[in-house]
Image (cartoon, rainbow, N blue to C red):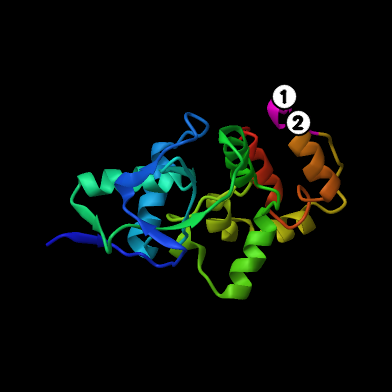
């Protein structure tokens, strides 16, 4: 019996996966760990968001969804099939190839930043357990493992109380050059100090822990 990948969204049209042409070259890389998360999300939630594509001279060029389509094809080689005639596609307008490639960069941009603390608050308000989604999501700037292990930091307030009145000292940490701007921003926003445990998250993101 064939394993089905559900289509759980709608768009302007349906295009067979074989008629969707990659267009971003080597702009992005997909690690094995993230590929596994992406496959888990497709198995669990189906194809949840339309492909963004640009039609030019009869060719359907993919602007957004390259990684999902890549994983879908690998799954299909492994016996999976799409539940339907193809994938939902939303058409994106572009004047020419250069303009279409610019729109790929726009689609790849991440302007709003999720932090460890904002993710924690969101999950709590939505009553979603991080264990239920951590193998299906990947959010820039967020340490999913830290959020999953947040309970490990619950006793830090008590430890701070025990240290009250003791002599303070300085700790010098050398931050890799590529992370310095981010760390300065986190310091300015107070993220490293609040809430409890965020300092550890920053160290992990800077590959210092």
Q: Position of residue 15 (x, y in %)?
A: 36, 54
For image coordinates 55% across by 51% down, the residue present is 92
Please provide the residue range marked out in magenta: 171-179
* Count of all numbered marks drawn on residues in the image: 2
- Circle 2: is it few (<14), some (14-19), or many (20+) Cα within 10 Å? few
Q: Residue 90 has which mark? A: none
For image coordinates 73% across by 60% down, the residue present is 157
| Residue denoted by label 1 | 177
Vertical side of 85 occupied by 38: above or below:
above
Q: Position of residue 45 (x, y in %)?
A: 39, 64
Q: Work out which residue is located at the far left of the displayed protein and give it.
A: 1
Q: For residue 85, what is the image quadrant?
A: bottom left
For image coordinates 81% across by 37% down, the residue present is 184
- Circle 1: is it few (<14), some (14-19), or many (20+) Cα within 10 Å? few
Q: Is residue 176 visible?
A: no
Vertical side of 61 occupied by 161: above or below:
below
Most frequent secondary structure within the magenta stretch: loop
For image coordinates 46% across by 64% down, the residue present is 11
Asked whether the residues under the numbered discs 2 and 1 touch, taking CB atoms below 8 Å apart as contact, a structural biologist would say: yes
In magenta stretch: residue 68: no
């Amino acid at each position: 019996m064939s394993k089905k990948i559900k289509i759980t969204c709608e768009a302007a049209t349906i295009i067979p996966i074989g008629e969707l042409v990659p267009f971003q070259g080597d702009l992005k890389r997909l690690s094995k760990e993230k590929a596994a998360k992406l496959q888990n999300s497709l198995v669990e939630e189906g194809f949840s968001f339309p492909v963004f594509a640009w039609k030019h001279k009869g060719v359907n060029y993919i602007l957004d969804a390259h990684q999902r389509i890549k994983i879908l094809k690998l799954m299909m080689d492994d016996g999976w099939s799409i539940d339907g005639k193809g994938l939902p596609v939303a058409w994106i307008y572009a004047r020419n190839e250069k303009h279409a490639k610019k729109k790929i960069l726009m689609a790849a941009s991440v302007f709003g930043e999720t932090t460890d603390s904002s993710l924690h608050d969101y999950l709590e308000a939505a009553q979603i357990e991080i264990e239920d989604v951590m193998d299906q999501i990947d959010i820039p700037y967020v340490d999913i493992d830290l959020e999953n292990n947040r309970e490990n930091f619950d006793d830090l307030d008590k430890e701070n109380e025990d240290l009250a009145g003791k002599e303070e000292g300085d700790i010098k940490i050398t931050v890799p050059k590529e992370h310095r701007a981010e760390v300065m921003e986190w310091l300015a926003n107070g993220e490293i100090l609040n809430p409890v445990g965020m300092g550890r998250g920053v160290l992990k993101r800077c590959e210092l822990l």
